[in-house]
Image (cartoon, grey):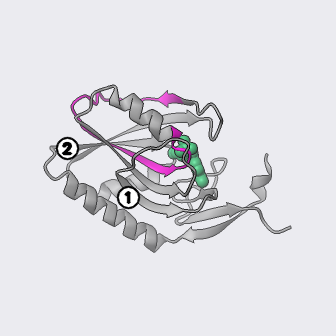
Amino acid sequence: MTARVEAEPKPLIDEREIERRVGELAEEISRDYAEADEIFLIGVLRGCYIFLADLSRRLTVPRRIDFIAVQSYHRAESGAVRLIKDVQTDIEGRHVLIVEDIIDSGQTLKYLLDTLKARHPASLKTCVFVRKECRRDVEVEIDYLGLEIPDVWVVGYGLDYADQYRALPYIAALEPGEG
Ligand code: IMP
Ligand code: MG
């Protein structure tokens, strides 16, 4: 166990703000894909699960859902990302939207974009709920962004620290506790 286990989650983004932004993103996406026959949402496990559930229920366009999982050597100099679970569908010719919980260095999203682009989707876009300010090692274009946050470790709304706190209904910053 590391020192961060002692940390106390401090609310950063409340449920109302989350709901409002998810609603706005769903409207924007539904508008942009109004002419498409269908969107293929690919959620990046595990952090995306609550955001994807909320977002997908608010879209007004036909959608399909699948999941992908990667292991990132987070902030490691190598920037290595490894695929540990692939989607179960051939994405060629589909309108793919990657749904990710958070972007920090950008390495995970960059890897996913490169990997999925090679499979010739009809279009490939990204939707990220939270972006940390000033952390990108790799510039990645985000087509739909929920919120910007400071460079702190956050938990809740699907996001974890050591697989804890995912079910918190709001997003909280994990900071070392006093004493
Ligand atoms: P990146 O490759 O550095 O952009 O990191 C992206 C991945 O790291 C995300 O998909 C999360 O799984 C994880 N991550 C980065 N920052 C946080 C955080 O503050 N809380 C929880 N997970 C995070
Ligand atoms: Mg993630």
- Residue at 50%, 51% (x, y): give it: 102
Q: Which residues are magenta?
A: 82-107
Q: Is residue 57 magenta?
A: no
Q: Where, quadrant-wise, is the C terminus in this rendering?
A: bottom right
State whether residue 62 is above or below residue 69.
below
| Residue 4 point in image, percent of width and height | 75, 54
| Residue 52 point in image, percent of width and height | 39, 52
- Residue at 62%, 40% (x, y): give it: 74
Q: Which mark is in front, 1 or 2?
A: 2
- Residue 36 picture quarter: top left
In-front residue for pair 70/131: 131
For the question of whether residue 60 can be seen, the reply is: no
Inter-mark Cα distance, 1 to 2: 18 Å
Q: Is residue 101 magenta?
A: yes
| Residue 103 point in image, percent of width and height | 51, 49
Q: Which label is found at residue 75?
A: none
Q: Secondary structure at mark 1?
A: helix
Mark 2 sits near ligand 2, with its Cβ under 8 Å away: no
Q: Residues within 10 Å of mark 2 (few under 14, many from 20)?
A: some
- Residue 153 picture quarter: bottom right
Q: Residue tagged by mark 2?
A: 38
Question: Would you say 133 lies left or right of 17 here?
Answer: right
Q: Residues within 10 Å of mark 1 (few under 14, many from 20)?
A: some
- Residue at 58%, 50% (x, y): give it: 135
Q: Residue tagged by mark 1?
A: 54
In-front residue for pair 154/138: 138
Question: Would you say 107 lies left or right of 1 here?
Answer: left
Q: Secondary structure at mark 2?
A: loop
Question: Would you say 9 lies left or right of 30 here?
Answer: right
| Residue 90 point in image, percent of width and height | 29, 27
Q: Do callouts 1 and 2 mark residues in contact (Cβ within 8 Å)?
A: no
